DNA sequence: TTCGTTCATTGATCTCGATCAATTGAATTT
DNA sequence: AAATTCAATTGATCGAGATCAATGAACGAA
């Protein structure tokens, strides 16, 4: 299939399994890394990786602001891809939330396969568009949402990505701390905690220990996430 | 030149004139639109545009939140490209800040040229990466910066993009209102105004009428933009 | 030029979320 | 099981920025 028609087909149907193929390319071409909990991923290739596939575990992509402020740009959970963007003023870091296996692949490495597999470019474009979309959605959250809306939106996102659904009830095993939630949604630990307590009081969720979170009322949570003032 | 080696070359040198080529493709393939001040750009092609080139004038890309809240995702000034991302919960709009001429090009339309011009995919990737980078940098601004840092950062960005530099002094002709500045940096009109007044009092800038802004002390402004607490 | 409208600035006050400060609780070590 | 440690929760207070309100300045229309 020629690249043009493949791309044309792709352009009209965005949703059918867009991640699989590129992730297999990345896994074949990229540099494999096992990162222990809390460590920062350091790739040894000469080319900076553009796309990272998280084979197992979870990572966070952060921007360091000043000396003590941190903004989490994105999470990468099991089987997800995460796009890096290393030509910026801000220093970014890819850090392991849990012990994880990741594969990083640079654009130069991917380019080698572009002529063999016409779908490769499309998959890359899809990945970048998806990363762009995620980032822009979070601009809305950080720019114009209340604390309640932020936390509710964050939990809904997690529900879609890592929850285990058992008869209509979502169970989330949180791979991140309260601080990391706070640094994602632009709040403080205390405010996140208070919001969670409030959700607990309203019977919307339940917590078991620090990291297990059971969403009891998804509809209510959705309502809170998009509540217009 | 085969696509792979072109891409490989591209991957190692990001900065050399990455916009030009794609913008010419977009202009040839895309749908041309003249949009009056304040109007929302409506393309008639069946395919939603992915990339928009702003030939003249200025546009804003906004996300509508609830009924009365708006978050500005990005600006597109003269000669700039702006990436759209239309598969989201949030409704986006591309609106003219001034009367402008724009060209919108869908991925499907671009794909037709991909086989003829190997650089096309690279340029597209560059554009998307640049959009991603912009968006992520703004996450830091919205998530972890003070009002002063936000306004200073915003003005620096404008300086780099649309200022006329006359013997070391930058003159900016603002194409947006105070409300639009506020909706970009996640503040209110009043706070933006107060921050501008403060910068004026400190002799860092000067205003003439509503829309002319003269930056007198760029170094000082830079200091304020990245000041760690 | 003057009028009228809209936008920007400035002032007064309020509020949400930040900060400071204990306390509680969970997980790990011994 | 007890001790240690660090994270999460809860309470009390503070403050940056929002909201409410009034004034002033710019710009378009007649």
Image: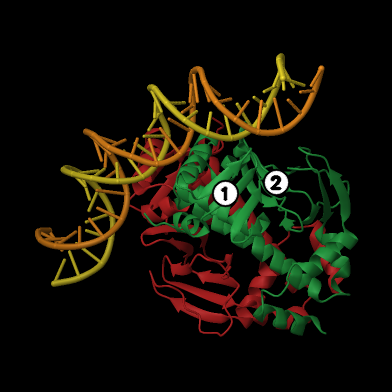
Chain colours: A green, B red, C orange, D yellow
For image coordinates 73% across by 79% down, the residue present is A7
Task: Decide if residue A67 is on the left or right side of residue C11.
Answer: right
For image coordinates 43% across by 46% down, the residue present is B214
For image coordinates 64% across by 72% down, the residue present is B23
Q: Dot 1 corresponds to which residue?
A: B139
Q: Position of residue A227 (x, y in %)?
A: 41, 56
Q: CA distance from mark 2 to mark 1?
A: 15 Å
Q: Is residue D10 above or below residue A183?
A: above
Foreground residue among B182 and B208: B182
Foreground residue among A2 and C13: C13
Name the chain under label 2: A
Q: Position of residue A105 (x, y in %)?
A: 83, 57
Residue A36 can be seen, yes or no = yes
Q: Is residue B18 above or below residue A148?
A: below
Q: Position of residue B182 (x, y in %)?
A: 41, 50
2 and 1 marks in contact (CB < 8 Å): no
Foreground residue among A211 and A167: A167
Foreground residue among B36 and B128: B128
**Label 1: how many residues lie within 10 Å, few (<14), some (14-19) or many (20+)?**
many
Q: Quadrant of residue A181?
A: top right
SS label for mark 1: helix
Task: Decide if residue A48 is on the left or right side of residue B33.
Answer: right
Which disc is residue A60 wearing? Answer: 2
Q: Position of residue B8 (x, y in %)?
A: 85, 63
SS label for mark 2: strand
Task: Decide if residue B36 is on the left or right side of residue B114.
Answer: left
């Amino acid at each position: 299939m020629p690249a043009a028609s493949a791309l044309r087909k792709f352009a009209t149907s965005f949703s059918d399994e867009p991640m699989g193929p590129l992730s297999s390319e990345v896994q074949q071409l990229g540099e494999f890394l096992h990162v222990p909990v809390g460590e920062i991923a350091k790739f040894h290739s000469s080319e900076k990786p553009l796309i990272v596939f998280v084979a197992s575990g979870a990572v966070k992509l952060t921007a360091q602001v000043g000396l003590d402020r941190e903004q989490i740009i994105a999470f990468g959970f099991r089987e997800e891809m995460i796009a890096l963007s290393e030509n910026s003023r801000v220093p970014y870091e890819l850090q392991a939330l849990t012990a994880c296996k990741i594969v990083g692949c640079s654009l130069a490495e991917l380019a080698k396969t572009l002529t063999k597999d016409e779908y490769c470019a499309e998959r890359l474009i899809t990945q970048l568009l998806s990363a762009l979309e995620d980032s822009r959605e979070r601009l809305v959250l950080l720019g114009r949402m209340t604390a309640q809306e932020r936390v509710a939106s964050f939990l809904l996102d997690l529900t879609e990505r890592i929850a285990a659904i058992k008869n209509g009830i979502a169970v989330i095993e949180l791979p991140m701390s309260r601080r990391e939630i706070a640094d994602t949604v632009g709040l403080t630990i205390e405010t996140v905690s208070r919001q969670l307590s409030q959700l607990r009081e309203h019977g919307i969720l339940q917590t078991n220990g620090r990291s297990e979170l059971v969403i009891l009322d998804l509809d209510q949570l959705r309502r809170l996430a998009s509540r217009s003032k």
